[in-house]
Image (spheres, rainbow, N blue to C red):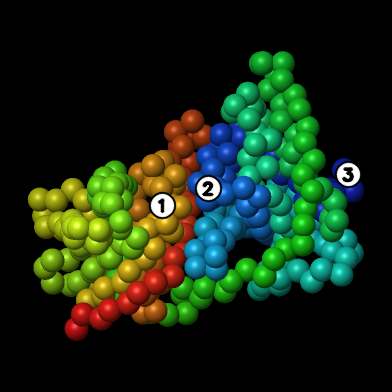
């Protein structure tokens, strides 16, 4: 699908949503509990992607397809003219990238704008991201300009460059309950994930100051935890609990979780969020997490 070409305005990028609920929910899932958090916005003919990173060992991203927007305008022919000396990251498709303070952007929405119409526009390199919120029923209208910054060099995690050895889709509620119990163990700093084609199939565990705590999630026919499970070999990998906690906002809003581990022991957590108020649309929040300690089980 090609991007719209219109004559109105001088901006490179413009999008509009009838309600900001979906956008603010997705952005909140990327807030990693620190101030001045930077996020990279990537607009292409397919839609809008938002990416953020933590210590180059965690990457989170959300994606809104162009069909999610009332209006989605990307003037590709103006990108090269307005990007200044900053070389945009190029992929197979033409795209526009800019970075903003995600924490500040999220604050601009505020509680009063929960159900407001939202319009975002960007006029090119060195220009601010303009956020306009309007709620006619509440006689509410506001506009914010957020300065954009140079796009940082994002870490190339290359998850798909390694074979995916283990994959399962599980109920978010069950996964959340297990993680909550394990996170309560005093002194625990890492989460150990064990996956195997033979029993026990899926085990989560932590080691604390005076206790080792292990939870097995069953995949037998009587279990309602998994909707899909595929394991080609046994794997054991450890991930920082502080990184796992960064995913809890997405987990608390998700219905299902797609968990994958590749041959390099990198963990992919895809959270699927359903929005009944937005015509029943479904969106995903994706986190990639590097393993901090690895053991093999043959």
Q: Are marks 1 and 3 in contact (CB under 8 Å)?
A: no
Q: Is any part of residue 48 visible from this angle?
A: no
For label 1, the residue is: 245
Answer left or right for 128 relative to 201: right
Q: Is 1 in front, or is 289?
A: 289
Q: CA distance from mark 1 to mark 3?
A: 42 Å
158 versus 281 height, above or below: below
For label 3, the residue is 9
210 vs 163, nearest the viewer: 210
Q: Quadrant of residue 22?
A: top right
Q: Secondary structure at mark 3?
A: loop
Residue hosting label 2: 33
The spot of residue 115 in percent (x, y) is: 59, 26
Residue 111 is situated, as x and y percent measured from the top left of the image, at 60, 26
The mark nearer the N terminus, 1 or 2, is: 2
Find the distance from the CA under tag 3 to the CA under tag 2. Answer: 36 Å
Q: Nearer the viewer, residue 42 or 204?
A: 204
> Could you tell me which residue is drawn at 37 percent across and 58 percent down?
241
Camera-side mark, 3 or 2: 2
Work out whether mark 1 precedes mark 3 in sequence or the reverse, and give the earlier one.
3
């Amino acid at each position: 699908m090609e991007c719209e070409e219109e004559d109105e305005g001088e901006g490179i990028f413009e999008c509009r949503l009838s309600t900001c609920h979906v956008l603010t929910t997705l952005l909140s899932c990327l807030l990693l509990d620190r101030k001045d958090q930077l996020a990279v916005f990537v607009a292409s003919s397919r839609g809008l992607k938002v990416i953020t990173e933590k210590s180059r060992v965690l990457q989170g991203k959300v994606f809104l397809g162009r069909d999610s927007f009332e209006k989605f305008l990307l003037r590709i022919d103006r990108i090269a003219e307005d990007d200044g000396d900053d070389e945009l990251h190029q992929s197979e498709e033409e795209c526009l990238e800019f970075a903003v303070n995600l924490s500040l952007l999220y604050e601009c929405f505020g509680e009063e704008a929960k159900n407001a119409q939202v319009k975002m526009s960007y006029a090119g390199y060195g220009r601010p991201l303009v956020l306009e919120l309007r709620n006619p029923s509440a006689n509410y209208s506001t506009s914010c300009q957020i300065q954009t910054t140079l796009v940082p060099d994002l870490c190339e995690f290359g998850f798909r460059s390694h074979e995916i050895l283990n994959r399962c889709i599980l109920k978010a509620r069950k996964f959340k309950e297990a993680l909550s119990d394990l996170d309560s163990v005093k002194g625990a700093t890492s989460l150990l994930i064990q996956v195997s084609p033979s029993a026990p199939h899926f085990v989560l565990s932590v080691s604390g100051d005076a206790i080792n705590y292990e939870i097995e999630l069953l995949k037998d026919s009587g279990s309602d935890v998994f909707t899909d499970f595929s394991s080609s070999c046994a794997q054991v990998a450890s991930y920082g609990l502080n990184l796992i906690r960064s995913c809890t906002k997405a987990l608390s809003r998700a219905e299902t979780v797609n968990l994958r581990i590749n041959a390099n022991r990198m963990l992919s957590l895809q959270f699927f969020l359903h929005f009944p108020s937005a015509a029943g649309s479904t969106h995903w929040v994706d986190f990639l997490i590097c393993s901090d300690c690895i053991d093999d089980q043959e």
